[in-house]
């Protein structure tokens, strides 16, 4: 009886090593102490008092419309730099509007870019809202919350892998 | 203070009355002879997976947690989120280690950790050290539950000068004392089902409704000052907040299931399997805790601190008033009453289990061990009931008579002290290599040095260890645990030569299912 008990895989199993993964994932703080990439849970028009907001009115025109907000991110991929809303509807970058600067190509001019402007790909009418630096949930937060779920999943997996074994061993 | 919010107060009183009734009738739930300590103090070890889930969740996620974690996020920002990795790490430890404790405790009838240490190492003084540490670390924890209760009572608009202001708190604790005495662990287990349901409803409503009111999560995070949003990156020869954050999470995770109330909850499970299943299911509460921490940021975005109607609440309770103010701001009065009841009942459940756990420790490991070795089972159970009353009254007097800051400081010291019991308990579940006298010396070194550091650094949790000019700020409890282990390991050969080992009453097979 004692020998049987000593062979019980629940006492030790190599599957337990999986439980070390969350320790590495959440104790290595420099890996996740960043704001980006953001998790965007909701896209709502900005409130009128938002600090990084520029508004214009379009009358069946393509622009350009000045952003009036300093842009600091490097490169030329501006998809996440700003949001553009038209009458409360979020427009898609590149398909609905493009970003440019009179100073030169976006990836070549010094930061911050202070004279950026948007141009619609087709004439539009309505109230335009341009928003900068409106992040979603920073990486630091959603990464750790995600690991709550992954950790629970790993523990459940290890439970099933180690609980089934005695039955198999009995057969 | 604000005027009394009668609607919220009515809902609060009705729910509080319901759980009080539940606490008394719980004595007939899964009926057992409450004249026996394992029936009164562990509910006969008959709770299945689901009840254990409610009980452990109700026990670990306390009213103080619900108030203090968002308050820390509100005041200090990202550092408050260490509670999330802490609860991520604690469940793998629960999964691997504590089914062994349950098995050996079930086999030998152990009710406390000190019972196990006594049986494993055959040394009553080491068991006494574990007992005293457990009781002393638990007392301020109970007192802090009262802080959570005080804050929600303040949120309801109830105030008064002197003793009159404390009457609601005294009534709540007298009721708690009465149903704990009558029903033992069955009372908090039954109430935990109500409390956890209310908490889940409240937090889910809060994380859906409040962001809609405030313009979404993007808007909430945009309102948080940049210096609070992330941990400050280390500058120069230091690991800065990175090591502080990681060691706080790891040290807290190692300490959690050494607290007597945590052990009482898991030993009341019906099997080691129920504990293992719970290790996978309990992270639902961790997710809840993470979402709850975000309420602190929601309070910043809502600007409740600057609203005149909450000014006196913030003046009295400081950042701890952030969550009550946010709930009052965002919800109709009746739902604020539900949310306050959830937090208030969230004080009763852990306070009841903590007082039972402290009573079990005193009765089994001091009264029976040193005063009345021949006492009957009924006398043992009766003594535990009386001690549970004394513990609660002591906590109540403490919080009424002593400034709240002392309870917080003692609770911080409690974290440093309780982790020093890790070597005999957790390592003891796997090996007897360490000599009990060496373990006792290591325990004393950890407690002594940890207490001195805490006092010297004005009761902050973080201590900067400097090695070769490089600073590693970290959780004092974890550093002093390392000292404890080094001392125990170094002195083991010495004590083996001088005193030898005590008798081990357990066998390897006792630890396995």
Image: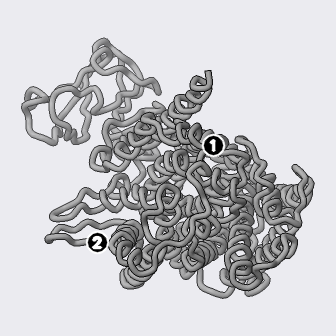
Residue B488: image location, x then y, percent: 39, 72
Q: Which mark is residue B464?
A: 2
Q: Is residue B388 left or right of residue B255?
A: right
Say which chain tag 1 marks: B
Quadrant in the rendering for residue B186: bottom right
Residue at 16% x, 42% y is A112
Residue B166: image location, x then y, percent: 75, 79
Q: Which mark is residue A138?
A: none
Residue B210 seen in this snapshot: no
Of B39 and A76, nearer the camera is B39
Of A167 and A88, nearer the camera is A167
Near mark 1 (Cα within 10 A), the count class, few <14, some 14-19 or many ≥20, is some
Q: Which residue is mark 1?
A: B513
Q: Secondary structure at mark 1?
A: loop
Of B199 and B154, nearer the camera is B199
**Number of marks drawn:** 2
Of B219 and B387, nearer the camera is B387
Residue at 84% x, 57% y is B19
On screen, B175 above or below B22? below
Q: Is residue B34 left or right of residue B416?
A: right
Circles 2 and 1: CB distance less than 8 Å? no
Residue at 21% x, 64% y is B238
Mark 2 vs 1, N-terminal side: 2
């Amino acid at each position: 009886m004692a020998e049987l008990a000593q062979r019980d895989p629940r006492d030790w199993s190599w599957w337990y090593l999986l439980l070390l993964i969350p320790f590495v994932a959440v104790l290595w703080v420099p890996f996740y102490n960043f704001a980006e990439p953001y998790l965007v849970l909701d896209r709502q028009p900005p409130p009128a008092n938002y600090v990084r907001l520029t508004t214009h009115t379009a009358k069946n025109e393509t622009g350009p419309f000045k952003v009036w907000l300093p842009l600091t991110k490097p490169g030329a991929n501006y998809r996440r730099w700003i949001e553009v809303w038209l009458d409360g509807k979020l427009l898609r970058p590149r398909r609905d509007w493009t970003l440019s600067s009179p100073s030169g190509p976006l990836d070549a001019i010094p930061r911050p870019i202070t004279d950026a402007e948007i141009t619609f790909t087709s004439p539009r009418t309505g109230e335009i809202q341009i928003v900068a630096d409106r992040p979603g949930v920073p990486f630091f937060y959603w990464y750790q919350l995600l690991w709550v779920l992954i950790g629970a999943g790993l523990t459940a997996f290890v439970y099933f892998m180690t609980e089934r074994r005695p039955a198999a061993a009995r057969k | 203070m604000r005027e009394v919010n009668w609607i919220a107060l009515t809902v609060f009183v009705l729910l509080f009355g319901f759980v009080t009734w539940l606490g008394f009738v719980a004595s007939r739930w899964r009926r057992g002879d409450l004249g026996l300590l394992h029936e009164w103090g562990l509910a006969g070890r008959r709770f299945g997976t689901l009840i254990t889930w409610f009980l452990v969740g109700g026990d670990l996620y306390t009213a103080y947690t619900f108030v203090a974690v968002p308050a820390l996020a509100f005041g200090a920002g990202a550092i408050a989120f260490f509670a999330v990795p802490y609860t991520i790490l604690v469940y793998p430890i629960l999964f691997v280690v504590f089914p062994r404790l349950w098995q050996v405790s079930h086999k030998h009838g152990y009710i406390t950790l000190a019972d196990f240490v006594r049986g494993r190492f055959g040394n009553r003084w080491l068991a006494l050290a574990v007992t005293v540490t457990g009781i002393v670390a638990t007392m301020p924890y109970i007192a802090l539950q009262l802080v959570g209760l005080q804050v929600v009572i303040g949120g309801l608009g109830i105030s008064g000068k002197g003793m009159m202001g404390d009457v609601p708190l005294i009534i709540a604790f007298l009721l708690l004392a009465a149903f704990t005495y009558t029903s033992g662990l069955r009372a908090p287990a039954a109430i935990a089902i109500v409390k956890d349901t209310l908490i889940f409803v409240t937090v889910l409503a809060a994380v859906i409704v409040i962001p809609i009111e405030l313009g979404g999560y993007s808007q909430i995070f945009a309102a948080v000052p940049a210096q609070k949003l992330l941990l400050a990156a280390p500058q120069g020869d230091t690991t800065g907040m990175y090591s502080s954050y990681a060691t706080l999470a790891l040290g807290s995770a190692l300490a959690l299931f050494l607290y007597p109330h945590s052990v009482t909850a898991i030993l009341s499970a019906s099997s080691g399997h129920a504990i293992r299943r719970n290790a996978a299911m309990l992270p639902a509460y961790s997710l809840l805790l993470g979402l709850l921490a975000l309420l602190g940021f929601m309070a910043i975005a809502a600007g409740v601190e600057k609203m005149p109607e909450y000014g006196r609440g913030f003046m009295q309770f400081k950042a701890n008033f952030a969550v009550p103010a946010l709930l009052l701001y965002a919800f109709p009065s009746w739902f604020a009453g539900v949310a306050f009841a959830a937090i208030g009942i969230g004080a009763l459940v852990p306070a009841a289990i903590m007082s039972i756990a402290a009573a079990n420790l005193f009765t089994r490991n001091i009264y029976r061990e040193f005063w009345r070795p021949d006492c009957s089972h009924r006398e043992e159970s009766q003594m535990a009931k009386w001690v549970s009353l004394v513990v609660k009254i002591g906590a109540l007097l403490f919080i009424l008579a002593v400034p709240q800051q002392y309870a917080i400081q003692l609770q911080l010291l409690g974290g440093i002290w309780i982790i020093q019991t890790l070597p005999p308990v957790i390592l003891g579940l796997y090996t007897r290599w360490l000599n009990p006298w060496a373990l006792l010396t290591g325990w004393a070194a950890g407690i002594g040095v940890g207490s001195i550091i805490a006092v010297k650094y004005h009761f902050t949790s973080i201590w900067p260890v400097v090695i070769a000019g490089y600073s590693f700020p970290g959780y004092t409890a974890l550093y002093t645990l390392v000292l404890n282990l080094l001392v125990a390991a170094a002195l083991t050969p010495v004590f083996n030569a001088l005193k030898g080992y005590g008798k081990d009453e357990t066998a390897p097979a006792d630890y396995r299912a």
